[in-house]
Amino acid sequence: MSGREQEHADRFVHGDAVDVLVGSDCFEPGSYTGRLTRIRVEGELVEIRPARCADAPAVTAMLVELGYPDNSVAGVHRRLVRWSRTADGAVFVADIAGVVAGVVAVAAIPLLEREGSLGRLVALVVDESRRGEGIGRGLVTAAETAALGMGCVSMEVTSSRHRTDAHAFYRQLGYQDWCDRKARFMRDLTARPSA
């Protein structure tokens, strides 16, 4: 871990942090080396750790809370396997005594116009009953630390306009709304072209 990554991690960690090697049904043994972070939230120990395939049911429920009800456990399981095999992304969960209370996914996109990569928060959700306790902040910090380790020099996140509470959360973490500077255009590549 570089000095910059360590400084970023040290800013956040209020509990024990240890380097770990994770192996499970989703990860090839030795495929992920990273930080296992433990923090105290409302008196409880929260472990921020890489997602495992066994977390698929809980991650599916989190995605429903985020507004994506069309996910199946099998589909999420397949995507967790895919994420576990990429060096340019990571998925972390907040685990409280074996119960998943939140999830974050981060991807690194290489930049062409300058050195480094752009880190993108692909998904972030905390169980509605646990919001406002610091779990989201812990997940974002884990994602940012992983992004630094993947060579990212900046981070971005997109959020639907109706999620005003999420916007306030990101602003508290130092993210700025750039909608007045950049437009976002999307195209579905799986849709058939119209005749």
Image (cartoon, rainbow, N blue to C red):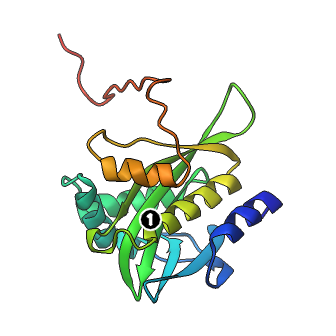
Expressed as whole percent of the image width and height from the top left, the position of residue 109 reads 59, 39
Q: Are there few (<14), some (14-19), or many (20+) residues within 10 Å of tag 1?
A: many
Residue at horizontal 68%, vertical 81%?
A: 18
Q: On the rendered structure, is 102 left or right of 174?
A: left
Identity of the residue furthest to the top in this view: 195
User: On the image, numbered disc 1 is attached to which residue?
Assistant: 136
- Secondary structure at numbered mark 1: helix
Is 163 on the left or on the right of 119, as rendered? left
| Residue name at image x 28 percent, y 71 percent | 57
Q: Quadrant of the C terminus?
A: top left
- Give the amino acid at mark 1: Gly
- Of 95 and 82, nearer the camera is 95
Residue 175: give x, y in percent of width and height.
53, 45
Residue shown at 73% from the left, 29% from the top: 114
> Where is residue 134 drawn, in percent x and y?
46, 71
Please tell me which residue is depicted at 23% across the width and 59% down the height of the picture: 64
The image quadrant where one finds the N terminus is bottom right
- Closest to the observer, 112 or 6: 6
